[in-house]
Amino acid sequence: METETSVLTALDIEEKSGCMISMVGGGGKTSLLFRLCKEWMTHGKTVIITTTTQMYYEPDCPYADWGESETIREQIDECGYVMVGQNIFTDPEGGKAWKLQGISAEQISSLRPEADVILVEADGARHKPLKMPARWEPVVPRDSDYVIGVMGLQALGKPMEQACHRPERAAEFLKKQVTERITKEDMLALALSSRALRKHCVGEYRVYINQVDCQAHKEVAAEFLKELEKNQIKAAAGCSKDVAVILLAAGNSTRFGENKLRYTIDNEPMYRHIVKKCLKLPVFRWIMVTQYDEIQQELQETPMEVVRNTHPNWGISHSIHLGVTAATHADAYLFAVCDQPYVSLHTLENLLESYRRERYGLAAVCYEDRWGNPNIFSAKYRKELLALQGDVGGKRILLAHQRDMLAVSVSEEQELKDLDKKEELL
């Protein structure tokens, strides 16, 4: 179960033109939908993204109202995909988020001639990892070729009233109280039932176990997949937000007096502390940008890919360019610097899990009111990252988009400390 694997392949979805896929349930349907869009486009297919309910909308995504056939074709010709709905409005609950107002199942079916593939968000879950549908839900177009039921593993072990949309209906179905915690057996029952995740299912049914964000989740997900296979249901598990870790280690250590990255701290070179922690994160790629032969050689036996920076004097922006360019197909980039050995694994895990859980395009660790590294940038900021010049890092982008930034607090100020001088060592 590797996140690099194509979801289309993992779910055994035939890669052919004229396909309509509807997604129901909870646990990150929108993120999964955009990942599938990217995969279809990799295969040269044009895509329409739409919804029968409401879904989040990124302001820089191509958009057309239903019925504007000429605009739909123009956007597809230019971008390869387009979002189609009735209206775009600001989410009244959050204020900062934009939402796309959906169209009817019949209107969606009329779009088939306009693109090779139609991806439909056919259910809403109010950000909850699980969903028990109401009488009128979900609204799945009758000519869907596949229906993917999505479940988020973050529900496991949490009270039903916290982790499930429409918890009273789920409690009635499972014969439990809304205050009781959700078990693996509960999730399996929801996945198998035509009253729950399979409700109104047409075409071929698939299940995607989302939010597999740590090793423990991987083990649980593997058990789910075995049980679903026993029930002859094709399924896959992973995280629909693929993050690439990019470690920056190309500085000249001028103020330190020697190569600080190889300076020994607690019997290990400084840079190895952040490397060992990052390799424990559930991401799909690890990239090290460095100018040093020794670091490249020492990382040969690890999953870390090394990108050589032969022009370190061009500033940190050049290392950022190299890392982003190498991280092809990533949905986001987690940047960390290798002269920050006191960052804890807990902080890294919390940053990653918080970013994947929330709907922000940026995330940064902070102590009180001071931001620092590491931080995460959605791929929607790729152009801005590649536009940085000289010795200017990503903080400029964070400052420019503070409303789209999630702050993740650390309890110890030393975690944010990057070591420029030997006297700063603890």
Image (cartoon, rainbow, N blue to C red):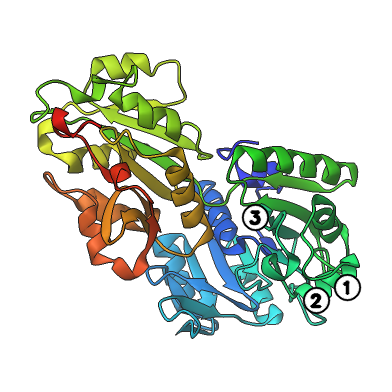
Do labels 3 and 2 touch, CB within 8 Å? no
Rendered view: 50 above or below 152: below
Residues at discs 1 and 2 in contact (Cβ within 8 Å): yes
- What residue is rendered at 74% in x and 59% in y? 149
Quarter of image, res 419: top left
User: Which disc is residue 416 wearing?
Assistant: none
* Residue designated by label 2: 168
Residue 110 in the image: state x and y as whole percent: 65, 77
Looking at this view, name the residue that lies furthest to the front.
Answer: 426
Q: Residues within 10 Å of mark 3 (few under 14, many from 20)?
A: some
The image shows a total of numbered marks equal to 3
Distance from the alpha carbon under mark 3 to that under mark 1: 21 Å
Horizontal relation, residue 410 to residue 257: left or right? right
Q: Earlier in the sequence, mark 3 or mark 2?
A: 3
Let me know if residue 328 appears in the view.
no
Which residue was labeled with disc 3?
A: 154
* Residue position for label 1: 172
Q: What SS does tag 1 mark?
A: helix
